[in-house]
Image (spheres, grey):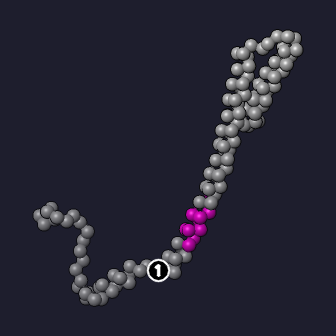
Amino acid sequence: MTLKWLAVVVAVVSLTSAVTGNVVIGMAGGELPVVANLFALTTAATAVVLAAVAELHDRLTDRLDALDKTLVTLDQAMITRLTEIEARAGDRNTGFVEGYLLSHGQDAEIVPFGRRGRGAAER
């Protein structure tokens, strides 16, 4: 039994016992103590709030699961699409490098990556 339905059962039993106690003692000419009524009402109210929170939690969990499945599907579709684009487009940097080398001749200077600034001139 889930928490939501357990809370509903607690609320129903609490209210039923309070009403039954008031009716039985009222028929005998007595009165149920206020503390007993307040306890029953407080228990029922707490159980109703707990049931509502449990229902909202279930709904949120269902929505997050659906969102997760959607994102996984989209991720797979995006990977497939990017793979198709990469296969169709090829490596465009290769053409850039070849064009650069052709325009500057075969003796084009190759600039190594490294630190620039004050320390670079001292090396």
Q: Position of residue 74 (x, y in %)?
A: 59, 64
The amino acid on which the numbered mark 1 sits, given as a three-letter code, is Gly
Vertical relation: 4 (above or below) 79 = above
Task: State the quadrant of the N terminus.
Answer: top right
Q: In which quadrant is the C terminus drawn?
A: bottom left
Residue designated by label 1: 90
The image quadrant that residue 46 belongs to is: top right
Q: Can you give x and y, in whole percent of width and height, for residue 27 in the image?
A: 88, 14
Residue 68 in view here: yes
Between residue 65 and residue 19, name the one nearer to us.
19
> At 59% from the left edge and 60% from the top edge, which residue is drawn?
71
Q: Is residue 6 visible?
A: no
Q: Image height check: is 10 above or below 76?
A: above
Q: How many marks?
A: 1
Q: Residue at x 43, y 79 (%)?
A: 91
The single residue placed furthest to the front in the displayed view is: 29
Instruction: Residue 116: say if magenta.
Output: no
Coordinates of residue 92 in the picture (x, y in percent): 41, 80
Q: Secondary structure at mark 1?
A: loop
Q: Is residue 32 left or right of residue 119?
A: right
From the viewer's side, name the closer residue of 26 and 18. Answer: 26
Q: Which residues are magenta?
A: 72-81
User: Which residue is rendered at x = 22% and y = 80% of the image?
Assistant: 109
